[in-house]
């Protein structure tokens, strides 16, 4: 029976090859979304193990973030950049969940997650959510949750204003573009909690800062930050 299943799987793969979203090579039978080579060679920042790392420093003097980290480096020719592009623009939703699981496995059992009560993805505006069909940050959050057991909430924070893309904007323009665009839905529900805000890419930190500033309006709340990639372009 297993032989017939494997034969059928090989036939399907021949007719409709499954390709790695990082390098474009065909996936082997035991590989899912990302090939073994990409899994191994994607450069990890290990920022979750490094106090005062570059992502944490982005928020110094801007908003009180307890801890901040990113899984990999986002560079012009990086595999993680290609994966995130497929995730955001080519309908590769499974890439977000899988990368989230991988990152979650790196984060779990480390002090980075100590005291984290809830994962909150950076929300999309409803109009963009309808066009894309999913929120990539929510999928990443789901993967992290599956690896760590920390629950995800998509009801705490809402994006109330449509913004233009942050690409090619200066740091100041990015801050202006996202200033005052988020609102808390359930302030009482997060009182006294430690929230992990999750996004796909951190560049200047403006979007995260806008989210954190709104969440921190609740009483006795702490905020930490995790992203799939830290842009060094």
Image (cartoon, rainbow, N blue to C red):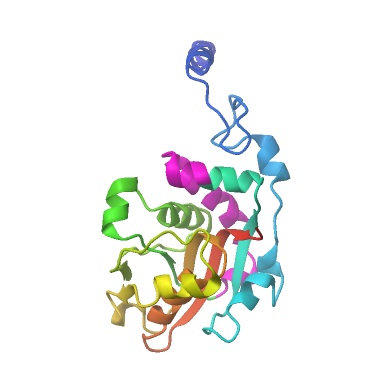
Q: Is residue 155 above or below residue 2?
A: below
Estimate the x, y position of residue 104 in percent, counting from the top left: 56, 56
Q: Is residue 71 above or below residue 7?
A: below
Q: Residue at x 41, y 64 (%)?
A: 122
Give the camera-side residue of 145 and 139.
139
Q: Which residues are magenta?
A: 85-114
Based on the picture, tell me whether residue 104 belongs to the magenta stretch: yes
Residue at the spot 34% in from the left edge and 63% down from the top edge: 154
Pick the front one: 7 or 72 = 72
Image quarter where the C terminus lies is bottom right
Q: How far across and down, in percent of the image, does residue 15 sit?
A: 48, 14
- Above or below residue 164? Residue 211 is below
Residue 194 visible? The answer is no
Q: Position of residue 119 (x, y in %)?
A: 44, 66
Q: Residue at x 38, y 53 (%)?
A: 135
In x, y percent, where is residue 62? Answer: 54, 84
Residue at the image position 44 percent from the left and 39 percent from the top: 90
Rendered image quadrant of residue 26: top right
Can see residue 49? yes
Total number of numbered discs in the rendering:
0
The overriding secondary structure of the stretch rendered in magenta is helix
């Amino acid at each position: 029976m297993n032989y017939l299943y494997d034969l059928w799987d090989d036939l399907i793969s021949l007719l409709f090859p499954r390709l790695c979203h990082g390098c474009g090579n065909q996936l082997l039978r035991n590989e899912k979304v990302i090939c073994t080579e990409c899994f191994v060679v994607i450069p990890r920042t290990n920022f979750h193990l490094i106090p005062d790392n570059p992502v944490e420093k982005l928020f110094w003097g801007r908003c009180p973030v307890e801890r901040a980290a990113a899984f990999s480096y986002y560079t012009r020719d990086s595999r993680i950049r290609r994966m995130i592009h497929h995730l955001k623009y080519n309908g590769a939703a499974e890439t977000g969940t899988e990368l989230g699981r991988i990152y979650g496995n790196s984060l779990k059992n480390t002090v980075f997650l100590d005291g984290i009560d809830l994962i909150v993805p950076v929300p999309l505006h409803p109009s963009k959510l309808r066009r894309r069909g999913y929120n990539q940050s929510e999928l990443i959050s789901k993967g992290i949750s599956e690896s760590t057991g920390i629950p995800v909430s998509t009801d705490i924070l809402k994006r109330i204003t449509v913004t233009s893309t942050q690409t090619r904007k200066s740091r100041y323009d990015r801050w202006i573009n996202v200033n005052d665009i988020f609102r808390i839905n359930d302030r009482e529900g997060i009182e006294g909690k430690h929230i992990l805000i999750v996004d796909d890419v951190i560049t200047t930190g403006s979007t995260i800062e806008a989210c954190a500033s709104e969440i921190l309006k609740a009483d006795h709340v702490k905020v930490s930050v995790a992203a799939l990639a830290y842009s060094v372009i």
